[in-house]
Image (cartoon, rainbow, N blue to C red):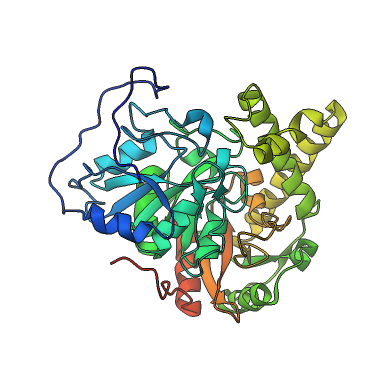
């Protein structure tokens, strides 16, 4: 386990700017205990042992940061060997905002390579373990963020969400995750996966903490969004595990959902269009990297982007535009849409990731809408299940109100029985 590193003269760096006004007062953090608790999970890749809290609305919180978000003095790797020696010279805007609000930023979190993947089994930094069951995925690509929060290694964490990378780990790890509206949070200091889709957002073990962090880093609309809640018609014909359907049914009843939204395309097709956007961007960004810098698996994934013809790309754009329009139109009638977060629970690392993993979560990214994942239940063998609410930009207060009502009715959150650092 590495601890805080100094910038090397030859390291790639985040552009320098004036330091934010750090404050030195704050509670003592036991990093030795944190490293011991982290060891079986591999959620953190680096700790900043100089971290302290300050004063402000988040002064009581310790927060971890996904490794694709620049954190001053720590490796800014994006989960890639290509950037293993890059040290951030300054904080990303969202990290600076958290520090200015008094939070202690305690380290960098493991993630899927280039934030493109579903398991957080990183070929360069190792696999993240789900605190509810070792050798199972914590989800991707923000798996380290989800595992660290669920295990109590930090009070909250930042992840990034391209097509579900905050909400899927939140669901698999049994915690809460919020993807803000696309243009509501700064992308400054983010190692991109798909600039048209990427959104930074928080994870936490309760909605109060989640909202406190969200209000600091993102534009937060106070509209209450009164109105009925809708479901997704026939769940878009996405095959779901029985535990997911049971939890989803309970959520629909608890929130009193009525009415349904029809999508113009199957979620599988919508998700593929989003994947191509990511693959094309990364192919241009990483296309010259050799096998010592990017894995064979990542090279294979990004190779799909350049293979699309002009006609294919026009059709992809049409699919995304129609999806965005359909969801935006639906939210003129409904205050939110409730649907499963993922079609399945966490699965073993040695199992291939299900192709439909992001079929539900991709919708909020394609439409640029805010979405919250809430713990909703448990499988028969003791793995968490999540459901999500998609709401209207500018109505974040109303979306959190609905999430609190749903959480109160379901009362499904519980910490891991064997991995919880207090």
Indicate whether 422 appears above or below 63. Answer: below
Question: Residue 20: x and y, percent?
Answer: 25, 31
**Image: 338 above or below 140:** below
**Furthest residue in direction left, as rendered:** 25
State whether residue 173 is above or below residue 264. below
Labels in figure, total: 0
In the rendered image, residue 119, in percent from the top left (x then y), is placed at: 59, 54
Q: Quadrant of residue 74?
A: top left
Residue 413, image x, y percentages: 45, 73
Residue appearing at x 50%, y 46% in the figure: 111
Residue 155: quadrant of the picture: bottom left
Q: Residue at x 55, y 33 (%)?
A: 192
Residue 273 figure quarter:
top right
Q: Quadrant of the C terminus?
A: bottom left
Q: Is residue 210 left or right of residue 18?
A: right
Q: Nearer the viewer, residue 341 or 220?
A: 341
Q: Residue furthest right?
A: 311
Q: Nearer the viewer, residue 123 or 280?
A: 123
Res 398 visible = no
Q: Is residue 85 visible?
A: yes
Q: Is residue 366 left or right of residue 307?
A: left
Position in image of residue 81 (x %, y %) = 52, 33
Q: Residue furthest front?
A: 292
Q: Residue at x 85, y 28 (%)?
A: 309
Furthest residue toward bottom: 380
Could you tell me which residue is drawn at 59 percent across and 65 percent down?
346
Picture layout, residue 147 above or below residue 410:
above
């Amino acid at each position: 386990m590495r601890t805080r590193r100094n910038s090397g003269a030859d390291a790639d760096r985040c552009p320098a700017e004036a330091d934010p006004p750090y404050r030195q007062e704050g509670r003592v953090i036991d990093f030795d205990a944190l490293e011991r608790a982290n060891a079986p999970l591999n959620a953190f890749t680096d700790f900043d042992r100089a971290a302290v809290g300050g004063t402000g609305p988040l002064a009581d919180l310790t927060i971890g940061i996904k490794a694709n978000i620049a954190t001053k003095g720590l490796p800014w790797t994006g989960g890639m060997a290509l950037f293993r020696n890059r040290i951030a010279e300054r904080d990303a805007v969202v990290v600076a905002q958290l520090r200015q609000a008094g939070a202690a930023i305690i380290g960098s979190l493991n993630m899927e390579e280039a934030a493109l993947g579903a398991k957080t089994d990183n070929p360069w930094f190792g696999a993240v373990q789900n605190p509810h069951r070792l050798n199972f995925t914590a989800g991707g690509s923000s798996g380290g963020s989800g595992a660290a929060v669920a295990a109590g290694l930090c009070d909250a964490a930042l992840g990034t969400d391209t097509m579900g990378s905050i909400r899927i780990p939140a669901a698999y790890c049994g915690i809460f995750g919020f993807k803000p509206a696309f243009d509501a949070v700064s992308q400054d200091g983010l190692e991109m996966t798909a600039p048209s889709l990427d959104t930074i957002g928080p994870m936490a073990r309760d909605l109060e903490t989640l909202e406190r962090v969200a209000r600091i880093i993102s534009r937060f609309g106070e509209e209450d969004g009164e109105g009925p809640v809708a479901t997704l018609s026939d769940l878009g014909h996405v095959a779901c595990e029985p535990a997911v359907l049971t939890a989803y049914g309970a959520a629909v009843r608890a929130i009193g959902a009525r009415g349904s939204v029809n999508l113009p395309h199957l979620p599988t097709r919508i998700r593929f269009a989003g994947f191509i956007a990511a693959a094309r961007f990364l192919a241009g960004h990483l296309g010259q990297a050799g096998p010592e810098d990017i894995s064979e698996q990542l090279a294979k994934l990004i190779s799909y982007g350049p293979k699309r013809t002009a006609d294919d790309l026009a059709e992809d754009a049409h699919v995304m535009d129609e999806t965005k329009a359909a969801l935006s139109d639906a939210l003129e009638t409904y205050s939110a849409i409730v649907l499963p977060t993922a079609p399945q629970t966490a699965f073993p690392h040695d199992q291939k990731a299900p192709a439909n993993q992001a079929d539900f979560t991709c919708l909020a990214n394609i439409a640029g809408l805010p979405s919250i994942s809430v713990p909703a239940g448990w499988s028969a063998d003791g793995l968490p299940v999540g459901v999500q609410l998609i709401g209207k930009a500018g109505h974040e207060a109303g979306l959190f109100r609905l999430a609190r009502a749903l959480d109160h009715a379901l009362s499904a959150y519980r910490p891991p029985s064997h991995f919880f650092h207090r």
